[in-house]
Image (cartoon, rainbow, N blue to C red):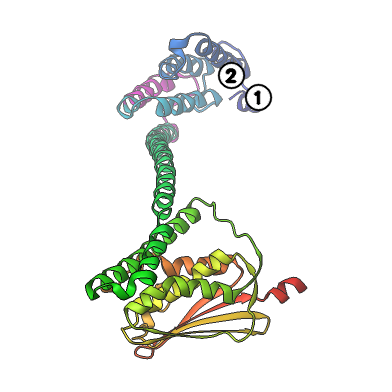
Amino acid sequence: MLVIALAWPGAGRTGQQLWILALGFVGYNLVVELVRRSVTRLATYAWVPFLDLPVTSVLCSYGAEAGGPLFVGFFLAVLTAANYLRLRFTMMYLAMVVASIAVIVPTLPSWSSEPGDVRQLAVRIVVLVMLGVGTALLSRRLTRYAGIASEMRSEAGRLGELDQMRTEFIASVSHDLKTPLPSLQAGLGLIVSSAGDRLLPDERRLVENSQRSVVRLALLIDDLLLVNQIRSRTLVIRRRRVDLRDAVGDAVSIVAPLLLQKRQTLDIDLPTPLPVEGEALRLGQVVVNLLANAHTHTPPGTRIAVDGRVEEGEVRLSVRDDGPGIPDTEIESVFERYHRLSAAGGGSGLGLADARLLVEMHGGRLWVESRPGEGAAFHMALPSARTVTAE
C-alpha cells in the first residue's frame, strides 16, 4: 500500500499526503503483530479482521479518494478474514465491508453520482466480494487437504510400523519353522534307508508323503523369507565364482521326492562347466523354483529336462517339460507375484516372481517359451564368469 501511495501523489481531506496515511496503516499492522507475539491468547488472526475494518474505513475516509491506494486496505482486510474466519463469518464480514464502503465512498469529495463513478464502485465491490468468497473457499479446501495429508502421514507411519512388525514376525516365524526341517529330512531319510525294506506299504507311503510335505514346507518358507528380505530391502547378493551345475545338483536333490511322487523323469544335460558370478544359494533357489513349477504343472509320468550351455558370453540354463503348456495370454503373467495358472495348480504363486527377481539381481534374464499342449521351457541367461572377469 505504501509503495502505491508513493507512486500515486495526492492529499487527503486534512491535507496530509496519502503516503503518510499509508505509512500509518503500516504502523498499525506492526502494532498488531507485536500484540500477537506478546499476548498468547491473541496469537491467532481471528480478531484482526474486526480491527482492520474500522481502521481501514477511517483511513479511506481521510484519503478522500474513492478508488485511491488506501482502498487496498479493504482487500487486505477481506483476505485476512477469508483465511482465518469460518465461512459463515466471512460472509457476514463481507457484508459489513460492503456496507462500510457504501457509506464511506459517497461521502468522499471526489465522489460523484455520475454513472461512471457508480459503475466503478459497483465493480470494486463485486471484485472485493469475489476475492473474499474465492479466498475463503480455497482456504477451506487447502485446510481440508492439509488435514487429509496429515491423516495420510499418520496412517503411513502406522502402516510403516505394522509393516516392520510384519517383517520381523515373518522372519522370526520362518526361521523357527525352518530350524527343525533338516532334522526332519534327515530322520525320514534314515528311516527309508535303514528300515525301508521292513516297512509295510502303507507305512512306506506315509513316510514318503512326509518327505514330500517337508520339501514343500521348505520351499514355501524359502519363498516367504525371500519376499520378506526383498520388501525390507535387506536382500544382498554375495557374488563369487560358482559353477551353475552345482546349483542344479543341489536343487535336484531337494525336489527329488516331489518328482518321485508323480513318477516324473528328470533328464539332465550339462556337459561342460557353467561358470557365473553370483551366490550359489540364490541361484540354487532359482533352479528349485523352476523345477518345482515344472513338477506342479506337469501331469504324472511326464518328463522334465534340464540343459545348459555357454553361448555368446552367456551361461544359459533351460528347464523344459512336456506338460499342457501356458496360454498365450498368460505368458508374462506367470511372473507376477501371487499369480497362478489355476486354483488347482497348488503353490504360493511366489516362486517364478522371486526367481525372475533373483536372476535380474545377478544381471541376467528369465523368460518362458510355450505353446498350449506342447509344454513350457523356462530359460535363464546369466553373464559368464569369463565375461565378467574380462570386464
For label 2, the residue is 22
> Where does the image place residue 8, in percent across and percent down from the top left?
62, 27
Q: On screen, 265 above or below 237?
A: below
- Residue type at numbered disc 2: Ala
- Visible residue check, residue 340: no
* Most foreground residue, 302 or 322: 302
* Most foreground residue, 32 or 362: 362
Q: How many numbered discs sit on the rendered protein?
A: 2
Q: Quadrant of residue 157?
A: top left
- Residue type at numbered disc 1: Leu
Please tell me whether mark 1 sits on a helix, a strand or a loop. helix
Quick check: is 29 in the magenta stretch?
no
Q: Which residues are magenta?
A: 92-118
Q: Residues within 10 Å of mark 1 (few under 14, many from 20)?
A: some
Q: Residues within 10 Å of mark 2 (few under 14, many from 20)?
A: many
Q: Residue furthest left?
A: 202
Q: On screen, 66 above or below 160?
A: above
- Visible residue check, residue 36: yes
Q: CA distance from mark 1 to mark 2?
A: 9 Å
Residue found at x 34% / y 90%: 373
For label 1, the residue is 6
Q: Quadrant of residue 84?
A: top left
Q: On screen, 300 above or below 132?
A: below
Quick check: is 117 in the magenta stretch?
yes
> Where does the image place residue 18, in percent across and percent down from the top left?
60, 19
